[in-house]
Image: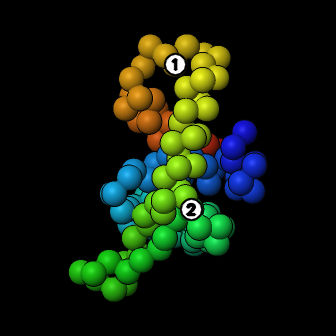
Amino acid sequence: MLAAEHDITGVQATLLIILEPNKPLKMSYLAEMFECDASNITGLTDRLEDVGLISRDQDPKDRRIRLLSLTKKGLKLRADILAQMAESDAIGLNVLSMNEREQMYKMLAKLVQFTE
């Protein structure tokens, strides 16, 4: 899988899928989504930031808030992961639109995080 090739975990790859292009997300939102402590999100995002896949910036409206955004490198890897998932259509995902698949991946990410 592409995640392993880029030395990131499956959960980190899922986080890349959740982050949409040009739509920064609050780290606190991800903590709520995954129903975990904010420190867990910090741990997940540290590696992604270290390898240049995401940026972590202050919210211009509230400097206490951190926003996550995909970098150009992150956008490319996200697209590659989604394409790879679509190609390996082992469970018949081709009946879903790309938007529907992205929503499904987001829901699965929440379930994966819950079980870890």
Q: Secondary structure at mark 2?
A: loop
Closer to the chain start, of discs 1 and 2, is 2
Residue type beneath disc 2: Leu
Residue 68 at what x, y percent from top left? 44, 66
Residue at 32% x, 78% y is 59
Which residue: 59% across, 67% down? 52
Disc count in the image?
2
Give the residue furthest to the bottom: 63
For mark 1, does the 10 Å Cα neighbourhood hold few (<14), some (14 to 19), or many (20 or more) residues? some
Find residue 79 and report its horizontal and vertical position in percent.
51, 42
State the residue position of label 2. Answer: 53
Q: Position of residue 44 (x, y in %)?
A: 61, 63
Considering only vertical position in the picture, is 67 above or below 100? below
Q: Evaluate if marks 1 and 2 touch, with contact meaning CB atoms under 8 Å apart.
A: no
Q: Is residue 37 visible?
A: no
Q: Which residue is mark 1?
A: 93
Which residue type carries mark 1?
A: Leu
Would residue 23 appear left or right of 12 to someone viewing this image? left
Question: Around disc 2, counting alpha carbons within 10 Å, would you say few (fewer than 14), some (14 to 19), or many (20 or more)?
Answer: many
Answer above or below: position of 110 versus 24. above
